Image (tube, coloured by chain):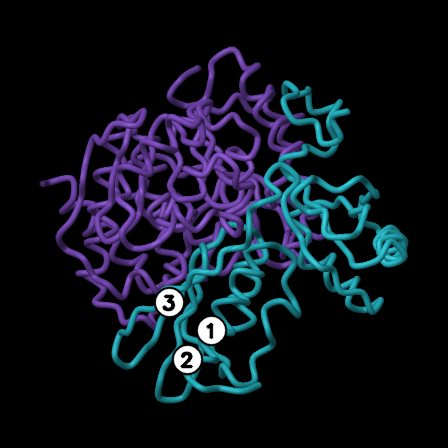
């Protein structure tokens, strides 16, 4: 595998009519048009939240880093799960042809059987790609009992409690004793690793961002905290997008996580958002935020 | 007999169309309701089956309906349309687990953020508009956000009326808690 092998980002668009001419799937290199519209093989995708926000952040970060943008595989899925299942089947069949050097999984219906097919296909590749999982696919990866096969999960506090609860099949069923403001995230991350619910590296999002590798705290990023960021839908997506871009630029994952976490926090300083700010207003600040985070 | 496959090794995907980790059970007051629920759900296209209940769900009924847990919202909608109200729902692997009931709120002054499980909703106090929805991982979350953001908490559709997944269920809890805290009625 060469550095020119693609990095593939897999997720969904919340519109059941998306890519209707191609079985609800769109695949190919993506590019950013301004800061609010994404182009994927000639198809325009508005950047409001979810996987389009992740892709927009990744494209903006790649441009700043001077590397090619990622490729994307997007399914039309507004929650019924059919689009995600189509994506799982397509991906499992086409991975040997794509041979990506990395995969980032995002808003997909947490279907364990679909997940297992994709993971088996990835494990069968001649060179194992780096595997990053966020959102619904992270839920499926944990539910499958194969979380440790992954290089990175990016949970928030509620999702971390779910990863640490060996019985919970979804954050909605996380047991109460693992939730609450007094729970120490580093302890939960350790519990998640010990119980097989965590990837090798966790980037835990919160008032203090933590990078935890195999249960051991590697980085703690605090300061430059903008509380309003917690309310904005898509700030986790911008973070995963920037981590992906840094991994594409061959940064080691723990270092990539620390840089991206700091850059994401700097977005809050640079954009000066309120709790009502849309994520698309943060994306123009990504180059400056990355520049400052890389300089520290 | 191992009804639920506990302790079994993971099977290859082609042998396991429905992992027990993603399955849940619904308990009803009467067996007749179980049968009606199975029929209604199968007619609606859901993959369900009637099974013996786990020990911690033996509340007088002797059967439960096993279903895809992630489809709980859609399953409950079909049941409600059929006039059926299950006594309880729980994951197959963890019958003692209860849905998250803890809420947290963040007061931003002009805005209030309410969190339930992995979902957050933020409301402008001045006009009760929903200004942001964040968290969650199921693909109906972005769709629900597009539907709800910008609308008033008073007249926005309840997330469960459109959502399909447990993330939508979490958002529903946060939505109703925000209505309660801000004294908003539908």
> In this rendering, is residue B76 above or below B126?
above
Residue denoted by label 3: A278
Circle 2 crowding by C-alpha within 10 Å: few under 14, some 14–19, many from 20? few
Could you say whether the residue bearing mark 3 is in a helix, strand or loop? loop
- Discs 1/3, front: 1
Q: Chain of mark 2?
A: B
Residue B142: x, y in percent?
52, 59
Residue placed most toward the observer, A126 or A45: A126
Q: Chain of mark 1?
A: B
Residue placed most toward the observer, A67 or A212: A212
Residue A206: x, y in percent?
28, 51
In contact (CB < 8 Å): disc 2 and disc 1: yes
Q: Quick one: quadrant of the N terminus of chain A?
A: top left
Image-quadrant location for residue B72 = bottom right
Residue A125: x, y in percent?
54, 15
Residue denoted by label 2: B181
Chain A painted colour: purple
State the residue lying farthest toward the top: A126
How many circles with numbers are drawn on the protein? 3
Residue pictured at 24% horizontal, 40% vertical: A210
Residue pictured at 45% horizontal, 43% vertical: A162
> In this rendering, is residue A146 above or below A35?
above
Q: Chain of mark 3?
A: A
Residue pictured at 53% horizontal, 49% vertical: A173
Image-quadrant location for residue A61 = top left
State the residue lying farthest toward the front: B60
Chain B painted colour: cyan
């Amino acid at each position: 595998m060469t550095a020119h092998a693609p990095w593939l980002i897999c997720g969904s668009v919340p519109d059941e009519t998306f890519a209707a001419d191609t079985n609800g799937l769109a695949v190919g290199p993506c590019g950013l048009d301004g800061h609010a519209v994404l182009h994927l093989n000639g198809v325009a995708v508005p950047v409001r939240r979810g996987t389009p926000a992740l892709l927009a952040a990744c494209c903006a970060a790649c441009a700043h880093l001077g590397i090619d943008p990622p490729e994307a595989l997007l399914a039309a899925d507004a929650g019924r799960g059919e689009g995600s299942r189509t994506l799982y089947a397509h991906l499992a069949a086409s991975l040997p042809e794509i041979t990506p050097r990395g995969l980032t999984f995002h808003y997909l219906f947490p279907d364990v059987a679909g997940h297992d097919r994709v993971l088996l296909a990835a494990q069968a590749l001649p060179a194992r790609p780096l595997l990053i999982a966020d959102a619904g696919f992270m839920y499926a990866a944990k539910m499958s009992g194969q979380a440790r096969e992954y290089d990175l999960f990016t949970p928030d506090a509620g999702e971390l409690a779910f990863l640490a609860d060996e019985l919970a099949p979804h954050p909605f069923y996380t047991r109460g004793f693992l939730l609450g403001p007094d729970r120490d995230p580093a302890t939960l991350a350790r519990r998640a690793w010990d119980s097989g619910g965590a990837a090798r590296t966790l980037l835990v999002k919160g008032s203090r961002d933590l990078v935890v590798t195999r249960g051991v705290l590697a980085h703690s990023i605090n300061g430059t905290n903008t509380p309003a960021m917690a309310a904005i839908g898509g700030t986790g997506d911008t973070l995963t997008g920037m981590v992906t871009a840094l991994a594409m630029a061959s940064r080691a994952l723990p270092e990539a996580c620390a840089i991206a976490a700091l850059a994401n926090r700097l977005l809050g300083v640079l954009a000066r958002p309120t709790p009502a700010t849309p994520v698309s207003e943060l994306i123009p600040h990504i180059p400056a935020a990355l520049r400052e985070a890389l300089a520290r | 007999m191992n009804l639920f496959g506990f302790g079994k090794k993971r099977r290859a995907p082609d042998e396991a169309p429905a992992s027990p980790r993603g399955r849940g059970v619904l308990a009803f007051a009467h067996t007749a309701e179980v049968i009606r629920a199975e029929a209604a759900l199968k007619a609606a296209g859901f993959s369900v089956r009637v099974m013996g209940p786990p020990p911690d769900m033996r509340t007088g009924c002797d059967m439960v309906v096993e279903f895809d847990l992630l489809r709980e919202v859609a399953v409950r909608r079909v049941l409600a349309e059929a006039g059926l109200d299950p006594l309880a729902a729980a994951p197959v692997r963890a019958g003692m687990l209860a849905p998250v009931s803890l809420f947290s709120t963040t007061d931003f002054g002009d805005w209030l953020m309410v969190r339930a499980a992995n979902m957050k909703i933020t409301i402008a106090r001045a006009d009760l508009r929903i200004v942001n929805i964040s968290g969650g991982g199921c693909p109906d979350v972005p769709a629900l956000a597009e539907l709800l953001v910008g609308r008033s908490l008073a007249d926005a559709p309840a997330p469960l009326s459109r959502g399909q997944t447990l993330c939508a269920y979490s958002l529903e809890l946060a939505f109703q808690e925000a209505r309660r805290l801000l004294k908003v009625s539908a």
